[in-house]
Image: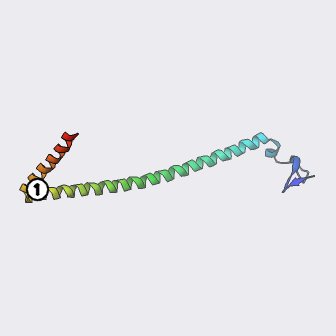
Amino acid sequence: MSTIGNQPLGGQSMSGGNQSTSRDNPTEELRRKAGDVKQSVQELGTVAKAAASEKMGELRDTATDYYERGRDRMYDAEQSVEDYIREQPLKSVLLAAGIGFLFGAFYIRR
């Protein structure tokens, strides 16, 4: 009798005794293995979902942090502009008029 590795060719047992029922019925063995694969895929899905949820939480925290920092910087910039206007109102008005004139000149050219 020929063998490959430890498995005999032709599905015969080397011991000559009865084989297990899963070997007698390939359909049952296929169903069992499909069930194993299904369970493995479900477990993988559960692990992937948990990892994605964790990463989303980290991203949410990072985005919130950046938003708060940006908001604080804008508030600081606003306060600086207000302070400058209060300290030097004439320069502020002239600067605003000059910027308005430049925007107007560019807008008319178009």
Q: Position of residue 12 (x, y in %)?
A: 88, 48
In the rendered structure, the answer to whether residue 26 lies left or right of residue 43 reads: right
Q: Position of residue 86 (x, y in %)?
A: 8, 57
The amino acid on which the numbered mark 1 sits, given as a three-letter code, is Ile
Asked whether 88 or 83 is in front, the reply is 88
In the picture, residue 105 is in which quadrant?
top left
Asked whether 87 or 51 is in front, the reply is 87
Q: Secondary structure at mark 1?
A: helix
**Going 87% across and 49% down the picture, which residue do you hit?**
9
**Going 49% across and 51% down the picture, which residue do you hit?**
52
Q: Position of residue 23 (x, y in %)?
A: 81, 46
- Colour setting: rainbow
Asked whether 105 or 79 is in front, the reply is 105
Asked if one can make out residue 12 in the rendered structure from this viewpoint, the answer is: no
Task: Locate the C terminus by quadrant.
Answer: top left
Q: Position of residue 85 (x, y in %)?
A: 10, 56
Give the residue pinned by disc 1: 85
| Label 1: few (<14), some (14–19) or many (≥20) C-alpha neighbours in 10 Å | some
In the rendered structure, the answer to whether residue 43 lies left or right of residue 110 reads: right
Extreme-left residue of the structure: 90
User: Looking at the picture, does residue 86 appear above or below residue 10?
Assistant: below
In the rendered structure, the answer to whether residue 85 lies left or right of residue 50 reads: left
**Going 16% across and 59% down the picture, which residue do you hit?**
80
Extreme-right residue of the structure: 1
In the picture, residue 77 is in which quadrant?
bottom left
In the rendered structure, the answer to whether residue 30 lies left or right of residue 71 reads: right
**Going 21% across and 55% down the picture, which residue do you hit?**
75
Looking at the rendered structure, the number of numbered marks drawn on it comes to: 1
Asked if one can make out residue 46 in the rendered structure from this viewpoint, the answer is: yes
